[in-house]
Image: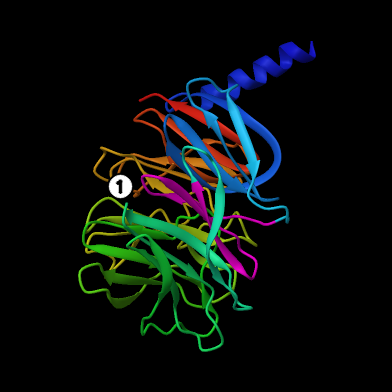
Amino acid sequence: MKNILSILFLSVGLTAFSQQVESLETILNDKISIRALELYDNKVWYSGTDSKFGYVDLKDYKTQKQIKLSEEKLQFRTLAQDKTSFYAINIESPGRFFAIDKKTLKSQVVFKDTAKTAFYDALHFVNDKLAYTFSDADKDQMLKLAAYKEGKWSMFKNNVKLNEGEAAFAASNTNISSSKKYLWIATGGKASRILRMNLKDEKFEIFNTPFVQGESSQGMYSVDFFDNNFGIAAGGDYTKQDANINNIATTIDAGETWQIQASGQNAGYTTCVKIKPGSKGKEIIAVGDKHISYSSDFGKTWTKISDEKGFFVCQWIDANKVVLAGNNKIAVMKLKF
């Protein structure tokens, strides 16, 4: 009887979301918190707690490998890649920049930030030769960036000063985004603003947003851009996860102005938002600790397509599949349209 009831319950749940979700299959169970994903060689790669780094083969879920980047119990919330290596930075000071060879999976520390305030929130490759990562600011409140150029990491000087209490959230490695022309960084806390850098001259402009802000737990947690103009940001307040006022916004002018979307009509606190490749910004997936949501109209309206809890980060595999990760698991969701 218990099995029958479980099947019936699952059927009812899937029916409720049947317009979008075909299946949701867990492909990794482990004692780990994962907040960063990369796709390469038909595999999903992850970094997480306890210095863990590994992959699951998307063609054969049973084919998996996991290694430890350090004997220390480091916590990784970043992951990115170029043609030959993956890169991951731990959040504790000192911040160690690990490079992991894609062929051998041998790792080495290629750069260090020894500042006591070092806490790297996101790492993003613009292309194979250029990457940026940023940390919590030092006492001077200046934006703290490191850049990867010509195969080497170094600190990146800039003149951006953050407001008192303005920082960023290492929630899903997605509060940096880029296009051919710009790099965007989304901040949060007592101020939630967009920092936009022109990639040609590396000069910054700063734009205010109407996002919920003012408390250390509030603001933008994730941002994604389709092109030089259209982008979406999502977040909220991790201490009030059901709150859904002023926590999703879009821009059509490269981040200069933002329009609040679905305020009071979305699933709440969101840690990761990703535009579907090929949709020109129209189709978007979003996840938070308590939901998986989907928009088919450029983020204007949202449908909660799953009540599955504990996901922090997501990535489109193809037009119909999304990989998700978070608390002790990685899963693949198949969608139908």
Residue at (64, 70) in percent of width and height: 93
- Is 153 above or below relative to 29? below
Residue 161 counted in the magenta span: no
Residue at (64, 41) in percent of width and height: 67
Residue 44 falls left or right of residue 156: right
What's drawn in magenta, residue-wise? Answer: 74-100
Locate residue 284, reporting x and y percent.
Answer: 37, 43
| Closer to the camera in the image, 110 or 73 | 110
Locate residue 183, reporting x and y percent.
Answer: 31, 64
Q: Is residue 327 visible?
A: no
Residue at (40, 64) in percent of width and height: 152
Q: Secondary structure at mark 1?
A: loop
Residue 252 falls left or right of residue 75: left
| Closer to the camera in the image, 328 or 98 | 98
Q: Is residue 178 visible?
A: yes
| Closer to the camera in the image, 103 or 117 | 103
Locate residue 42, reporting x and y percent.
Answer: 43, 29
Residue 93 counted in the magenta span: yes
Figure quadrant of the C terminus: top left
- Is 42 above or below relative to 215? above
User: Given the image, on which type of amino acid does mark 1 rest?
Assistant: Phe
Q: Residue furthest bottom?
A: 140
Q: Residue furthest right?
A: 1
| Closer to the camera in the image, 134 or 223 | 134
- Is 155 above or below relative to 51? below
Figure quadrant of the N terminus: top right
Query: Where on the picture, by quarter, is residue 255?
Result: bottom left
Q: Residues within 10 Å of mark 1 (few under 14, many from 20)?
A: some
Q: Which residue is denoted by mark 1 in the rendering? A: 298
